[in-house]
Image: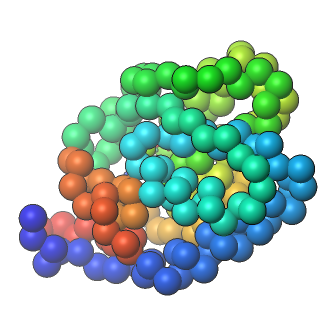
C-alpha cells in the first residue's frame, strides 16, 4: 500500500479538537442525554467512537449498514441497506453519525427509512461536508469541516477498503 500519493488535508490534532467542540455542543443541545447514536458503516466507525466519548452524557450506540459506492470513487446512485439496526428507535432522539456528506443521496434515503420507525427526533452529525457536490437537499445539524470537492481517505474513510486506519484525513491524489 503506497502512501506517496496522499496529501494531509486535516491533521489528526485538528480533527480531535473539532470533535471536542462538537461533543460539547451536542451535550448542551441534549442536556438529559439519552441520545441514540446511529453510526453508518463502515466509514463512520472512527468518528463515532471519538464523538461518543466527547459527548459527556448517557448515549446508546448502534450501527446501520448502507452501501452506495461500490469500489469506485463515485456513487453508483443506488442505495441499499446492507445491515439493519439491532434495536428499535421508536420514541428515541436519534443522532445519525456519518463520515462525509457528498451528493446527500445516502442520508436522504436513510432519513426516509428511519422516519417510518417513529423516532422522537432525528438529527445528523457528519465529520466532513462537500457542499459543492450536493444533489439531494439534506440538513446536516453538526458538521466537523467543510471541504472542497476532492476525494479524501483516512479517519474511517476508504478507497476500495484501504486507508481507513489513518489518523489524518488525506486527499488521494490522481496517479
Ligand atoms: P452521498 O450519498 O453521495 O452523500 O455519499 C456519501 C457516502 O459516500 C459516504 O458515506 C462515503 O462512504 C462515500 N464518500 C463520499 N465522498 C467520499 C470521499 O471523498 N472519500 C471516501 N468516501 C466518500
Ligand atoms: Mg459512508
The answer to whether residue 53 of the structure is visible from this angle is yes
Q: Residue at x 52, y 75 (%)?
A: 15
Please identify the quarter of the rendering in which residue 66 is found.
top left
Image side of residue 143 versus residue 165, left or right? right
Location of the N terminus (image quadrant) = bottom left
The percent position of residue 160, horizontal first and vertical second, equals 21, 47
The percent position of residue 50, horizontal first and vertical second, equals 55, 63
Residue 74 vs 166, above or below: the answer is above
Q: Residue furthest front?
A: 58
Residue 112 vs 27, above or below: the answer is above
Please identify the quarter of the rendering in which residue 153 is found.
bottom left
How many marks on residues?
0
Residues 84 and 32: in front is 32
Residues 115 and 45: in front is 45
The percent position of residue 92, horizontal first and vertical second, equals 79, 31
Image side of residue 61 versus residue 40, left or right? right
The percent position of residue 81, horizontal first and vertical second, equals 45, 22
Image side of residue 159 versus residue 82, left or right? left
Q: Residue at x 25, y 53 (%)?
A: 159
Please identify the quarter of the rendering in which residue 167 is found.
bottom left
Q: Residue at x 47, y 68 (%)?
A: 148
The answer to whether residue 138 of the structure is visible from this angle is no
Amino acid at each position: 500500500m503506497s502512501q506517496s500519493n496522499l496529501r494531509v488535508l486535516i491533521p489528526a490534532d485538528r480533527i480531535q479538537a473539532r470533535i471536542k467542540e462538537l461533543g460539547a455542543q451536542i451535550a448542551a443541545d441534549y442536556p438529559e442525554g439519552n441520545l441514540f447514536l446511529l453510526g453508518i458503516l463502515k466509514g463512520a466507525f472512527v468518528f463515532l467512537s471519538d464523538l461518543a466519548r466527547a459527548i459527556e452524557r448517557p448515549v446508546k450506540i448502534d450501527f446501520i449498514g448502507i452501501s452506495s459506492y461500490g469500489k469506485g470513487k463515485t456513487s453508483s446512485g443506488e442505495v441499499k441497506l446492507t445491515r439493519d439496526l439491532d434495536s428499535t428507535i421508536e420514541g428515541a432522539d436519534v443522532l445519525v453519525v456519518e463520515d462525509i456528506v457528498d451528493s446527500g443521496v445516502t442520508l436522504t434515503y436513510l432519513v426516509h427509512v428511519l422516519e417510518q420507525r417513529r423516532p422522537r427526533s432525528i438529527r445528523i452529525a457528519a465529520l466532513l461536508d462537500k457542499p459543492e457536490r450536493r444533489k439531494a437537499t439534506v440538513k446536516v445539524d453538526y458538521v466537523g469541516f467543510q471541504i472542497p470537492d476532492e476525494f479524501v481517505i483516512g479517519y474511517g474513510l476508504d478507497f476500495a477498503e484501504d486507508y481507513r486506519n489513518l489518523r489524518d484525513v488525506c486527499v488521494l491524489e490522481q496517479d
